[in-house]
Image (cartoon, rainbow, N blue to C red):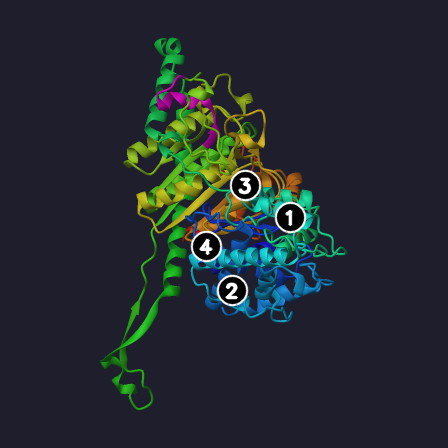
Amino acid sequence: MRKTQEIQGNLARLLATENLLVEHKQVSTASFDVDKRVLTLPLWNRASDTVYTMLVGHEVGHALFTPNDFAFTDDCPKAYVNVTEDARIEKLMKRKFPGLTKDFYKGYQELNEDDFFCIANEDLTKMTLIDRINLHYKIGAYALLPFDDAETPLRDAVGDAETFDEAVAAAIAIYEFSKEQQEKKQQTSVPAKPQGSDAPSSGEQETKQEQKPESGGEEGEGEQQEEEESRPWFTDSDPEEDHRADRDHDQADLDTPSYEYADPDINNVTTQRNFDNAAENLIDKEATSPEYVTFPKFDMSKIITPNKALWEKAEEYWSEYYADRIEEGMDIFGETDSNFVKFCNDTAKDVNYLVKEFECKKSASSYARSTTSRTGVLDTKKLHQYKFSEDIFKKVTRTPDGKNHGLVFLLDWSGSMSGEIFDTVKQIINLAQFCKKVGIPFDVYSFVTDASHNQFFGLPTDAEYKDIPDHQTRNEGEFWVDKRFKLVNLLTSEGNNKYFKHQCHMLFRVASYWQDRSYYAFRPNPPHFLGLGGTPLNDALVVMHQYLGEWQRKQGVEKSHLIILTDGESQCIGRTTGPEESPYFQHVYPRTLGYNTIIRNKGRYYNGIHNANTSATSGLIRILRDSYPECSILGFRICQPRALSYYLRVLDAWDHIDEYNKVFKRDKSVVVKNSPYTELYVIKSNSYDQDVHMEVAEEATKSQIKSAFKKTLKSKGVNRKMLSAFAGQIA
């Protein structure tokens, strides 16, 4: 059913040649809001594909041809205009898309066979003119409907209408004719007055009483009834609301004839009312209406904590917090700084290895894309081969230029990363050094939801939530990102090598706090605004939807890579709702994404979002890959062996659980191909360490040296395997 909804939604947008908003809801019939450009389709479970296509074609006809700036006439009931306009737009749709003709024919035939119009046992000659005209243009091809000579021109005027005004004029003419015919019938039914008597008969009195509602004060009441019983395609309200009066008063009853009365009501189109009521039986009563979510617009200046301001504030914090120790001449970062120098020296080989891998794979890729062509100029070195070879001309090999690359890192800065943050930061510094060496622009961000970053935006740290300036639009149905959400720029390629090394040094200081504390008696605290928190990964992905495009344009890159490093699932994300969804709020507020959420983006609809964390993450990654085809999204997931199976189930990789578990147990890492990511590198927790040099005691035996050497090679193998796969993706 969901697949059918997606197909019909895409069909509607294609037919309309515009990015219509298509929504499937618990409504009785399809409708189109010509002002908001929203096509609403019912959640049917019994309708065939042909009927569904017919309805989509019909409503798209209103989108294309029904004006949204019309003024309704009081000269005839709205239901009459519905009929004439329906006939007009269906004619124009079949003219514009001839392939729809068959769908309209078969669709109405199918519905008529199910007696949706309730005419199986009816005398067609007793129907009102507007009812017969309605049936004529819907099922007239296989239901011969009677029209006399006076009615035929009115019927044909409906079919000849090319504009909305002509359709309205035809509706008015039909209504005026119907009133005249009803008046004549009433007059002929009055008994003859006895000769010599001036008193009116009782029948004449009744006739006059019956005629009164058609003029004067009762006219407004009739118009109100007509409005309640009309179709909803030119209203701004929920289509279900438009049909509520019909359902309350006239339930579809296929066993009771609709025209048992002597004088049919000319103010209503009974066949269409019956059709709308019968359509309710097609609705899937068990289905829930999906929630539709779109992306908001962000002010990035209110989200990104700048790199330079961050580290200046960090140094200021340390100098103030440890002022008394510094005055005593204590070098609070002495040991940490020496460890940083040692780390840079130890990992230089790994960085150079990564650079070499990148250059080799880049060259191989360029060679694979190279083309060779003959110049037409003789190669004098091959002239002696002219008798047995035609290949005696000089050749030119052209190697296409590669695309400029750029990298954006998203680092999980949550409390659960405390045991891995030090090794993860070291790996990121390695990758950043690689990017700096090969000239690839990059930015490294941690994602947090923390009010302590208010100070970077001119606000006190303890500012109330309402006083924090908003960073996004808050339109109903958009993703809700907390105003306290921040992207903290830890490292950037902007600036010279000296400043780059300074950034790495500062980040190393912060990360060192979370290494194994049992080895140190004292370790400086990180600044309070760099403390660990939650995991707003989904919020970061929503922001990336806008940020990646802006970043690519700023850096002048053609191909980008988004690198996500995390150890767990994202916290839930919400959508913006309005006061109408709750009697307790008079303003917009967040509501967690629920089951059956559909994300709308650039004319595409992404379903399968069943919760606000794991499936939302997968959906957001898919959208990013579709929105930025030149962007690969690489995931680094730190994972315990016992948690790998669960994580693979989250990724819907059920068929590969045993395979990946086997590789993960053997190599302490595995590259997952069939996931929302372009590639996902799952790494065993505590195996991320870059310290791979061999350490043995002075009096170690040959066996101990051999064991240490094997351990070193294995550690290098895990690390370099990941680096090699990563370099391949970048190249």
Give the amino acid at mark 4.
Thr
Whole-Å distance between the Cαs marked 1 and 3?
A: 29 Å
Q: Earlier in the sequence, mark 2 or mark 1?
A: 2
Q: Which mark is residue 154?
A: 2
Give the amino acid at mark 3.
Gly
Q: Earlier in the sequence, mark 4 or mark 2?
A: 4
The residue range painted magenta reads 447-460
Give the amino acid at mark 2.
Leu
Is residue 459 in the magenta section?
yes
Give me the residue at 33% from left, 38% from top.
493
Whole-Å distance between the Cαs marked 2 and 3?
A: 26 Å
Is residue 114 placed above or below 32 in the rendered structure?
A: below
Whole-Å distance between the Cαs marked 4 and 2?
A: 21 Å
Image location of residue 148, percent across then percent down: 58, 69
Q: Earlier in the sequence, mark 4 or mark 1?
A: 4
Q: What residue does disc 4 label?
A: 66
Image location of residue 479, percent across then percent down: 50, 37
Whole-Å distance between the Cαs marked 4 and 1?
A: 50 Å
Is residue 599 placed above or below 321 in the rendered structure?
A: below
Near-viewer residue (300 or 196): 196
Whole-Å distance between the Cαs marked 2 and 1?
A: 36 Å
* Element class at badge 1: loop
Q: What residue does disc 1 label?
A: 200
- Give the position of the N terminus as an image quadrant: bottom right
Is residue 500 in the magenta section?
no
Q: Are marks 2 and 3 in contact (CB under 8 Å)?
A: no
Give the amino acid at mark 1.
Pro
Near-viewer residue (263 or 33): 263
Q: What residue does disc 3 label?
A: 220
Image location of residue 518, percent across then percent down: 56, 21
Image location of residue 204, percent across then percent down: 64, 50
